[in-house]
C-alpha cells in the first residue's frame, strides 16, 4: 500500500472548526494515512495575516488533538520567501518519494483561481487535487479549468488508488458557515466567537490579545 498524505494549506488566522471539519472529512473519505495542516507564512494571494506566523502556528498546534489523524506541517513558515504551493509539494515529494500519493485540498473558490497561481500547471505532476464543493458553489470557472476537469477528474475515491498524482476529485462537505474574517470581527467588536473554534485556540487569542483594535 502506498502512503497517502493530504495537505490543507491556509493562513489559519485563526484556525476554526470549518478548517478542522473539512480536514477530517477528507481524511476519512479518502482513507488517508494523515492529513497535514500547512500554515502559510507569506501567502501571495491574501492580505497580511493579523496574527504572526508563530502565533498562527501555535493556534494550529493547539487545535490538533492526538489521535485525530491530523498533523501540523510548518515547512512554509521555515522559508524566507512567499509561500508557493508548488514549492511545498516539491519539498514533500523529495521527502516522501515518488510512490507516496499526495492530495492537495482546495476550496472551490481557490480552485477557480488556480490559473493565477505560481507554476500552477505543474501541481498535478506532484499531487492529486481535492476540491471541496460548497452546496451553493458557482459553476462558472475559466475555460482552462473546465478542460482540466474534463481531462483529469474522477468520480470516486477508489479511482485515486492507482496513482500518486494527476487526478482531480470534487467532494461535498458538511456546510459550516464559519470564516476567520467573521471570527476576527467578533473579537474586534468585543463579542464572543466561542463554539466557532476550539476552546484552546480561543484561550490563546484572549491571552495574546489578538485581533483587538
Image (cartoon, rainbow, N blue to C red):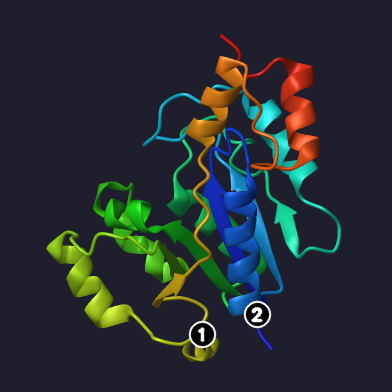
Q: Toward which corner of the image does residue 63 lie, by quadrant?
A: top right
Which percent across, then down, holds residue 181?
A: 48, 32
Q: Estimate how packed mark 2 is, as few (under 14), some (14 to 19) or many (20 or more) residues with alpha carbons within 10 Å.
A: some
Q: Which residue is rendered at x = 57% and y = 64% of the image?
A: 93
Q: Quadrant of the C terminus?
A: top right
Q: Position of residue 85 (x, y in %)?
A: 46, 50
Q: Nearer the viewer, residue 66 or 2?
A: 66
Left or right relative to 52: residue 136: left
Distance from the alpha carbon under mark 1 to that under mark 2: 9 Å
Quarter of the rendering containing residue 199: top right
Residue in the image at 34% along x and 52% along y: 109
Circle 1 SS class: helix
- Mark 1 or mark 2: which comes first in sequence? 2
Residue drawn at the location 19% of the way across and 70% of the way down: 146
Labelled pair 1, 2 in contact (Cβ < 8 Å):
yes
Residue 10: mark: none
Q: Front-most of 166 and 132?
A: 132
Q: Where is residue 132 drawn, in percent x and y?
A: 44, 64
**Residue 140 vertical placement versus 12 (above, below):** below
Q: Quadrant of the N terminus?
A: bottom right
Q: Residue at left 66%, top 57%? A: 36
Could you tell me which secondary element the residue under label 2 belongs to? loop
Q: Is residue 76 visible?
A: yes
Spot the residue most to the top. 213
Residue 125's place in the image compared with 162, above or below, is above
Q: Which residue is under mark 1? A: 157
Q: Residues within 10 Å of mark 1 (few under 14, many from 20)?
A: few
Q: Residue furthest right?
A: 66
Q: Which residue is mark 2?
A: 31
- Image coordinates of residue 69 in percent, x first then y, are 76, 65
Left or right: where 163 falls relative to 144 = right
Q: Is residue 203 above or below residue 213?
A: below
Amino acid at each position: 500500500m502506498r502512503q497517502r498524505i493530504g495537505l490543507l494549506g491556509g493562513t489559519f488566522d485563526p484556525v476554526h472548526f470549518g478548517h478542522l471539519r473539512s480536514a477530517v472529512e477528507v481524511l476519512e473519505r479518502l482513507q488517508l494515512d494523515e492529513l497535514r495542516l500547512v500554515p502559510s507564512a507569506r501567502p501571495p494571494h491574501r492580505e497580511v495575516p493579523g496574527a504572526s506566523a508563530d502565533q498562527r502556528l501555535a493556534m494550529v498546534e493547539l487545535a490538533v488533538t492526538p489521535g485525530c489523524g491530523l498533523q501540523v506541517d510548518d515547512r512554509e513558515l521555515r522559508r524566507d520567501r512567499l509561500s508557493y504551493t508548488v514549492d511545498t509539494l516539491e519539498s514533500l515529494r523529495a521527502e516522501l518519494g515518488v510512490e507516496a500519493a499526495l492530495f492537495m485540498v482546495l476550496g472551490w473558490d481557490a480552485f477557480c483561481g488556480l490559473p493565477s497561481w505560481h507554476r500552477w500547471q505543474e501541481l498535478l505532476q506532484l499531487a492529486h487535487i481535492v476540491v471541496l464543493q460548497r452546496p451553493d458553489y458557482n459553476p462558472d470557472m475559466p475555460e482552462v479549468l473546465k478542460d482540466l476537469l474534463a481531462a483529469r477528474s474522477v468520480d470516486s475515491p477508489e479511482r485515486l488508488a492507482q496513482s500518486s498524482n494527476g487526478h482531480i476529485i470534487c467532494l461535498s462537505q458538511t456546510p459550516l458557515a464559519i470564516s476567520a474574517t467573521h471570527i476576527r470581527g467578533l473579537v474586534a467588536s468585543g463579542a464572543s466567537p466561542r463554539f466557532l473554534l476550539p476552546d484552546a485556540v480561543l484561550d490563546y487569542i484572549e491571552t495574546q490579545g489578538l485581533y483587538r483594535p
